[in-house]
Amino acid sequence: MTQLSTSMLSILEMDAETVVHTGGCHCKSVRWKVVAPSSVVALDCNCSDCSMRGNTHFVVPAVNFQLLGESSKFITTYTFGTHTAKHTFCKICGISSFYHPRSNPDGVAVTFRCVDPGTLTHIEIRKADGKNWESWFNQSDISSFSKVQK
């Protein structure tokens, strides 16, 4: 595993409940680490893409997410609709372990089931109404999820 960046270390020092999670796809071609709380709020979205994939994810600031090794060689991206969300998945096994969400262009959505066991202590699952994205987004606090806490 590579060393943590300075910004990731400062985030760790600020919050004792923040840990380094590792994870990735099924075949392990895509691997990443993310600095996030051990207790997360995950979104169960009913948009056409998330509902078909069964994707339930938590959002973190992009600066807290890092691809490891040669993972980028194994990633491909799918977009639809506004093409704002960048749905990434492994070219080998097809698993989408993370993506760049429309709701948080400054963040990364991590599929909680793709986090390696042992670091997530609690997962609160909230419903996200992706079928009615604009009205849901305007009433939600999701945009705050990708902001670095100071």
Image (tube, rainbow, N blue to C red):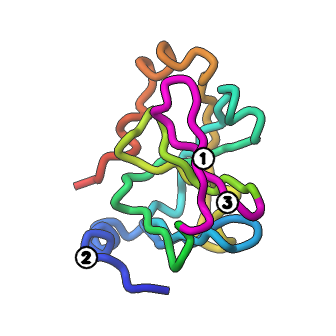
The label nearer to you, 1 versus 3, is 3
Q: Position of residue 101 (x, y in %)?
A: 49, 39
Type of the residue with mark 3: Cys
Which quadrant of the rendered structure holds the C terminus? Answer: bottom left
* Magenta segment boundaries in residue numbering: 73-93
Q: Secondary structure at mark 3?
A: strand
- What residue sits right under mark 1 in the picture? 57
Question: Can you tell which mark lies on residue 6?
Answer: 2
Question: Can you tell which mark lies on residue 1?
Answer: none
Mark 2 is surrounded, within 10 Å at the Cα level, by few (under 14), some (14 to 19) or many (20 or more) other residues, namely few
User: Relative to 140, does residue 102 appear above or below in the rendering?
Assistant: below
Type of the residue with mark 1: His
Location of residue 141 (image quadrant): top left
Q: Earlier in the sequence, mark 2 or mark 3?
A: 2
Mark 2 and mark 3: Cα distance apart in space: 28 Å
Location of residue 104 (image quadrant): top left
Mark 3 is surrounded, within 10 Å at the Cα level, by few (under 14), some (14 to 19) or many (20 or more) other residues, namely many
Question: Can you tell which mark lies on residue 90?
Answer: 3
Residue located 60% across and 42% down the image: 78
Q: Secondary structure at mark 1?
A: strand
